[in-house]
């Protein structure tokens, strides 16, 4: 049973436009959410996070939105750049040892 | 600062063989974990450890063993490899605070024939 779901395997966006990556979760006990970015042949790297007490967190071009009632979070990248092309994973954790549960990933392609 | 180091980078095993995937971190992180990445499945947690001497199961622990005798090292053992264990394996570590992000190694690509 997938507790964290990313239903779009891929997304293609033009350079300069907004990229929106979506993530849904089923476990209402999750209280901390993170986004990771992964390039081929490398390990994932941390991008941005949000606590369940907030509904928005911003870091430069990256903004994460959390809708607790819908159990949904999204990552907005504005403006998108070709270097943003990567696989993006959302992840969630709760107090059981703080283990992190990941979604399936969305491959973003930003075209020049 | 090396961060999280995984060895080997690539490995081919025959069904039934055993091997150990090595993971070492030099950041003095108490929390360490192992994930496998498969197409369409994302990253799935195999085992994790909140400190030396303490390990626990993740989402997909069957077929894998771990131990944590030091803070720095967290090896993953495959006792009898199966083709279903063909995957890319990632080790990760972080500080005890669960809001501290995970630092990942660059992965081990394992093929079981």
Image (cartoon, coloured by chain):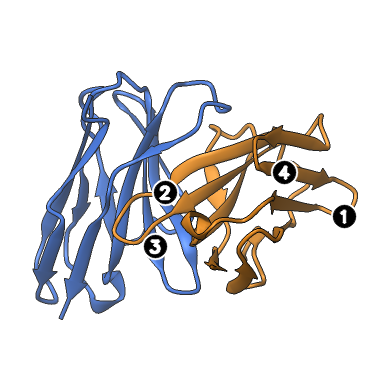
Chain colours: A orange, B blue
Dot 2 falls on a residue whose secondary structure is loop
Q: CA distance from mark 3 to mark 1?
A: 27 Å
- What SS does tag 1 mark? loop
**Mark 3 and mark 4 on one chain:** no
The image shows residue B72, relative to residue A84, as above or below, that is above
Cα gap from disc 3 to disc 4, whole angstroms: 24 Å
* In the image: residue A51, left or right of residue B89: right
Nearest-to-viewer mark from 1 and 2: 2
Q: Chain of mark 3?
A: B
The disc at residue A44 is 2
Q: Secondary structure at mark 3?
A: strand
Nearest to N terminus: mark 1 or mark 2? 2
Q: Chain of mark 2?
A: A
Q: Is residue A106 left or right of residue B74?
A: right
Q: Which residue is mark 1?
A: A70
The chain letter for the residue carrying disc 4 is A
Quadrant of the image occupied by residue B52: top left
User: Looking at the picture, how far across and down is residue B45, in whole percent?
Assistant: 44, 52
SS at badge 4: strand
In this view of the protein, which residue sits in the foreground, B61 or B28?
A: B28
Label 3 sits on residue: B37
């Amino acid at each position: 049973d997938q507790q964290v779901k990313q239903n779009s395997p891929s997304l293609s966006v033009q350079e300069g436009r907004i990229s929106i990556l979506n993530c849904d979760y089923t476990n209402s006990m999750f209280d901390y959410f993170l986004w990771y970015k992964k390039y081929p042949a490398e390990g994932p790297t941390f991008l941005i996070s949000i606590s369940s007490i907030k509904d928005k967190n911003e870091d430069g071009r990256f903004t994460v939105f959390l809708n607790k009632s819908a159990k949904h979070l999204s990552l907005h990248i504005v403006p998108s750049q070709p270097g943003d092309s990567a696989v993006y994973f959302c992840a969630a954790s709760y107090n059981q040892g703080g283990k992190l549960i990941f979604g399936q990933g969305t491959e973003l392609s930003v075209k020049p | 600062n090396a961060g999280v180091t995984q060895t080997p980078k690539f490995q081919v095993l025959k069904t039934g063989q055993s091997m150990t995937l090595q993971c070492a971190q030099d950041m003095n992180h108490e929390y360490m974990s192992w994930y496998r990445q498969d197409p369409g499945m994302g990253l799935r947690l195999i085992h994790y450890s909140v400190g030396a001497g303490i390990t626990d199961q993740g989402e997909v622990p069957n077929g894998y063993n771990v131990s944590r005798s030091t803070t720095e090292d967290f090896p993953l053992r495959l006792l009898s490899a199966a083709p279903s264990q063909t995957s890319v394996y990632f080790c990760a570590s972080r500080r005890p605070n669960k809001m501290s992000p995970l630092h990942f190694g660059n992965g081990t690509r394992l093929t079981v024939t």
